[in-house]
Amino acid sequence: MMPFDGPNSKFFTPENEAKRQAVNRWIRSTRVADGVIDFDAAVRDPNQPSRLLTDYDSGDHLHPNDAGHQAMADAIDLSLFRP
């Protein structure tokens, strides 16, 4: 799950951030899937991990802009799709 904190965010609460962190921990550590594409790591602000990097924020602090979508695409390891 990607970050969604920011000024006037309609969705961010400390409780929701804790849930997001728990879900991401599970996704990154589970053995249920063959692989993981970590969009959180691709678009979060390294100085404020609960927020999208400003360059990737569409303005609502929830959805990535075109550059954010490109960063997500660049994060995909295409070898995950090879037999």
Image (cartoon, grey):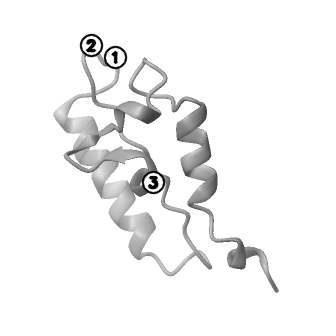
Q: Is residue 48 above or below residue 26?
A: above
Q: Amino acid at mark 2?
A: Asn
Q: Which mark is residue 10?
A: 1
Q: Would you call the spot at circle 2 few (<14 residues within 10 Å), some (14-19), or many (20 or more)?
A: few
Q: Amino acid at mark 3?
A: Ala
Disc number for residue 8: 2
Which mark is first along the chain, 1 or 3? 1
Above or below, comparing residue 25 to residue 33 in the picture: above
Do the residues under discs 1 and 2 have CB atoms within 8 angstroms? yes
Q: Name the amino acid, label 1.
A: Lys
Residue 35 spot, x, y in % from top left: 58, 75
Q: CA distance from mark 3 to mark 1?
A: 22 Å
Q: Secondary structure at mark 2?
A: loop
Residue under pointer 3: 42
Left or right position of 82 against 80: right
Q: Secondary structure at mark 1?
A: loop
CB-based contact (under 8 Å), mark 3 and mark 1: no
Image quarter in which the C terminus is found: bottom right
Closest to the observer, 55 or 4: 55
Of badges 3 and 2, the one in the foreground is 3
Residue 61 placed where, x, y %?
38, 25
Q: Residue at x 37, y 56 (%)?
A: 23
Tell me how many marks there are. Answer: 3
Q: Earlier in the sequence, mark 3 or mark 2?
A: 2
Residue at image location 69% in from the left, 76% down from the top: 80
Q: Position of residue 44 (x, y in %)?
A: 35, 46
Kindly identify which numbered label has been placed on residue 20.
none
Q: What's the distance in space between the residues labelled 3 and 2, CA to CA?
A: 23 Å
* In this view, the mark in front (1 or 2): 2
> What whole-number distance in Å separates the C-alpha atoms at marks 1 and 2?
6 Å
